[in-house]
Each structure stands twice: as C-alpha cells, then as structure tokens.
C-alpha cells in the first residue's frame, strides 16, 4: 500500500528506545556560511595575484582556497541535508551525508596535493621569475583571512564534516605562510627555488591531515565499530548479564557521528524473563559503553 506522507510513527522513539534523533540538530549553518563567503572572495583575488606574480606558492595557496570554497559549500549543503528527518525511503535519516562530504573533500585535497607537487618539481628544472613583493603582500592578507576562517570553523567541534573542511583551511593557512616566506626570500635575496621548495613542504603537511580525514570518514561510511568502543568487550559484557547464555550475530556501528548503535541475537534461559534481562542489558550498555540504541532478538538455545 502506498502513502503520500512518511510514516512518522515508525521513526518515533518510545520509552526504552534510544534517545537520539536520526538527524543532526546542533550544527550551526552560519559557521560554514561565513567561512564560504570569506574563502571564496579572497580565492579569486589570490588566484589573479598568483598568476600575475608567477608564484607557485601563491598559486598553490589560491588553489587551496578555491578548493576550500567548494569544500565548504559542499559541507554547508551536507549539513542542510543531514538535518532532514527520516523518510519512508530513508529510515535512518541523512546523517551520513556529512561523512560522505568529508570523504569527497579529502579526495579533492589529495588531487590538489598531487598537482601542486608536480608543478613544484617541474619548476626545479625550469625556474620561473616571481614578483616577491606582490607575493608577500597577498600572502599576508591571505594568512589573516585563513586565521579568521579557521577560528570560525573551530567553533563546531562535533561535526566530522566541519573537521574535514577545517583541514582544508589549515592546509590553506600553511600555504599562505609558505607563500609569505617565499615572497620575503625572493624579494630580499632573489632566490627562486624557495617557491617550489615551500610548496612541496606544504603538500607533505597537508597530506597527513587529509589521510586522517579520509580514514575517519571511510571508517564511518563502512559502518566500522566506533573507535571508543571495544567490540570484544561489548560481546563479553553482554554474555555476563544475568539470564544471558550466549550472544551471536552482534554488530556495533554509528547511526550518525557520535551515536553508536547495536544489534544482535541473545540466547536466554527463559523468554518470560526477557523484559527484565533486556532492562539489565540496556543499563549495562549505556553505563559501560555509552550505547543507547539497542536492538536485540531473544532466542532459546537450539
């Protein structure tokens, strides 16, 4: 039977159910909106200045900011989508959108790092004349913009997606710092190799943070056991609850970032005692493992 409205009652939580919602409420969209506007505005200015000054360090920083603008825009869109409640077609809601966006952002950053590294290596064989003073002035402005954006993003400490966007900005901040040093060295000494050298240095620094974001978002998307939960310990503690004989087909993952869930089959001595046993299980899981979204099927020994 079809219906024109989502069956909201199917998603409702009653007494004894998990207390969290299947969508995100706490994230402030204005945080990402401010970051997007600041980043995108300066990205165009820095890109123009970078090509005019012929500085790879400045161009790489501009590339970071262009990517940041897109990444932050994607992060903002992801947070808007993630706030949508569950529907008839998406019973878990859209909380995974944030981690998906974080993963895409990480991949985009990897591609950018590869391009900058390639350009830097080619400049060792073919040095380019760089306008050091222009690079210095623009890099100072870029450094200030990135500090402001990083500070704004640091306000949201819960979203993995915002963390991924922050990685972009921190890499961009390092890029501005590298461009500033390159500009000063070139302006006062005329030593051009400093431009590609510092660009490579930034690539290595950003690569490490990017890999961390990719690993975290990939682990979540693949429904991995939350890092703060010991899967073996959970199974052992369940088997020690009074009335439980054995546990099997046990799965632990995160419904949305920060909200772990558990499902499994439990063999019990007496099905009539299941309500009491389930209450003991829920209390133990919440107190010892911070898991409150529990779905267990009681079974008699076969």
Image: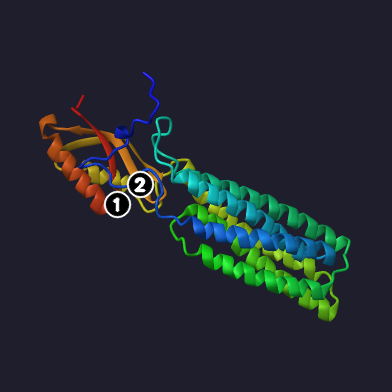
**Mark linked to residue 290:** 1
Q: Are marks 2 and 1 in contact (CB under 8 Å)?
A: yes
Instruction: Please name the residue that numbered disc 2 is placed on.
Output: 260
- Left or right side of 41 for 80: left
Task: Tell whether 54 sits left or right of 65.
Answer: right
Q: Residues within 10 Å of mark 2 (few under 14, many from 20)?
A: many
> Disc count in the image?
2
Specify the quadrant of the image occupied by residue 36. bottom right
- Residue drawn at the location 76% of the way across and 60% of the way down: 47
Image spot of residue 94 (x, y percent): 45, 41
Locate the N terminus by quadrant.
top left
* Extreme residue in the bottom direction: 188
> Gap between marks 2 and 1, in whole Å?
8 Å
Label 1 CA crowd tier, 10 Å (few <14, some 14–19, many 20+): some
Asked whether, in this view, residue 130 is left or right of residue 98, the answer is: right
Image quarter (top left, top right, bottom left or bottom right) of the C terminus: top left
Does label 2 or label 1 sit earlier along the sequence?
Answer: 2
Where is residue 179 shown, x and y percent of the image? Answer: 73, 70
As drawn, the residue found furthest toward the top would be 1
**In the image shown, does 257 or 83 lie closer to the viewer?**
83
* Residue 177 visible somewhere in the drawing: no
**Residue 121 placement, left or right of 104:** right
């Amino acid at each position: 039977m079809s219906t024109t409205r989502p069956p909201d009652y199917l998603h409702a939580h009653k007494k004894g159910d998990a207390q969290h919602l299947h969508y995100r409420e706490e994230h402030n969209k204005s945080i990402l909106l401010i970051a997007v506007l600041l980043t995108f505005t300066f990205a165009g200015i820095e890109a123009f200045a970078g090509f005019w000054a012929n500085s790879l360090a400045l161009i790489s920083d501009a590339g970071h900011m262009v990517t940041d603008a897109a990444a932050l825009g994607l992060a903002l869109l992801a947070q808007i989508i993630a706030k949508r409640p569950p529907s008839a077609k998406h019973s878990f809601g859209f909380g995974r959108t944030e981690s998906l966006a974080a993963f895409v952002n990480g991949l985009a950053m990897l591609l950018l790092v590869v391009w900058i590294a390639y350009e830097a290596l080619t400049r060792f064989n073919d040095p380019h004349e760089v306008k050091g003073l222009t690079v210095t002035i623009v890099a100072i402005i870029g450094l200030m913009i990135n500090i402001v954006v990083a500070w704004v993003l640091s306000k949201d400490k819960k979203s993995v997606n915002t963390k991924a966007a922050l990685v972009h900005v921190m890499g961009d901040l390092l890029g501005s710092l590298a461009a500033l040093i390159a500009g000063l060295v070139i302006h006062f000494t005329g030593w051009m190799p400093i431009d590609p050298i510092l660009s490579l240095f930034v690539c290595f620094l950003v690569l490490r943070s990017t890999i961390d974001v990719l690993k975290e978002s990939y682990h979540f998307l693949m429904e991995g056991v939350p890092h703060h939960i010991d899967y073996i310990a959970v199974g052992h503690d369940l088997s020690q609850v009074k009335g439980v004989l054995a546990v099997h087909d046990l799965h632990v993952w995160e419904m949305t970032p920060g909200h772990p869930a558990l499902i499994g089959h439990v063999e019990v001595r007496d099905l009539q005692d299941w309500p009491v046993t389930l209450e003991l299980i829920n209390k133990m899981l919440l107190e010892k493992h911070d898991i409150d979204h529990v779905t267990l099927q009681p079974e008699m020994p076969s």
